[in-house]
Image (tube, rainbow, N blue to C red):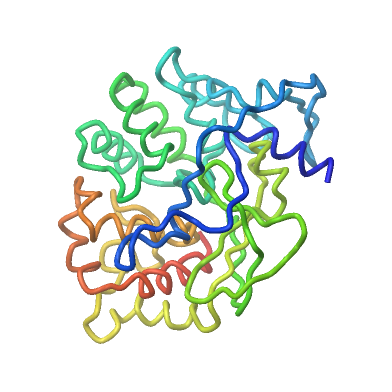
Amino acid sequence: MKKFIAILALAPVCVFVTGLPAYGADGPPEWAYPVTPLGLVLPPDDGVPRRVPGSTATYTLTQIRDRFIAPVWHPNEHAPLPDIVAQGRKPDVFACGFCHRADGPGGPENANLAGQPAGYIVQQMADFKSGARTTSVAKRNVDLMIALSKPITDAEVAAAAAYFSALKPRAVIKVVETDTAPKTFIMANHMAAVPSGEKEPLGSRIVEVPEVLEQFVHRDTHAQFIAYVPVGSVAKGEALVKTGGAGKTLQCSICHGPDLKGLGNMPAIAGRSPSYMVRQLYDLKSGARAGANSALMKAVVANLSVDDMALIAAYLASQAP
């Protein structure tokens, strides 16, 4: 329990909950949009250096919590970080690598940027800046992206986009089909398994959690995730992705390439966080995400239910990036 409390102390905000905010029967899926209530006061830094497996680097709690620092645990695995990725620019532009990590894998609460087309990344920043890309549920990390898109310069965006685009994406998600999943709590806009190991019925949700919470909280790029999905989801999602489900949607390969790893400036969607993917599909359908190329997605999402979105996301998460 002491170790678990120490892990919680690292997060910007965390809180145990018995249920997520009610967004309405036809609204955004609660499990895909976890929003951490504000109000927790973090304990002070105890000064003890933190470490992660396979690294000689150390960081204090203060450094790990600092949004102008992107911890670099494994420097030999990627190129040196551009300044905007490594440290941002005070006072308003946080380090890109703080949230998206030093080599871009991100987490369930945000985007995996590794290997995404540079032009796509640049366009998303433009959409955040113009107000074309928002979200169906107020989430602090999306609000941060919108806020920092205003003062960031075109040169800084270009440098970050070039860096992340040149990285090789890695598999970071294990998909498990099951009828039950760990009970969870909200931690910094993502879910984490309760330390007791208790389970509960999964239903039609996807429950995506860090495999080793401490690694993810330490912003280790080696952190892995487990996505618990309903039994049969991967096969059903494959049918929707590859055939369009008898007219329900369109084949994803048309725009995202035959291997779903991107085509031109269209993003890769294989191996992505299922929580993130469901949010994007829902936001596209709701109109919250209305930036460049959104019109191309309207026919794709128009007839999709949230359950359909979860099936598609489960299949995509199971594929090699």
Count of marks placed on residues: 0
Residue 136 as seen in the image, left or right of residue 29: left
Above or below for 190 versus 122: below
Residue 172 as seen in the image, left or right of residue 288: right
- Single out the residue that lies furthest toward the top: 90
- The one nearer the camera, 164 or 284, is 284
Task: Residue 66 in the image: state x and y as whole percent.
Answer: 59, 22
- Single out the residue that lies furthest toward the left: 295
Residue at 70%, 56% in the rendered image: 194
Above or below for 93 versus 172: above
Residue 34 as seen in the image, left or right of residue 288: right
Task: Residue 284 in the image: state x and y as whole percent.
Answer: 25, 56
- Single out the residue that lies furthest toward the bottom: 246
Residue at 29%, 55% in the rendered image: 283
Picture quadrant where residue 255 is located:
bottom left
Residue at 36%, 58% in the rendered image: 23
Picture quadrant where residue 285 is located:
bottom left
Task: Residue 157 in the image: state x and y as whole percent.
Answer: 35, 27
Task: Residue 65 in the image: state x and y as whole percent.
Answer: 62, 26
Residue 131 as seen in the image, left or right of residue 142: left
Residue at 34%, 55% in the rendered image: 280
Above or below for 179 versus 90: below
- The one nearer the camera, 84 or 10, is 10
- The one nearer the camera, 219 or 16, is 16
- The one nearer the camera, 113 or 227, is 227
Above or below for 183 versus 191: below
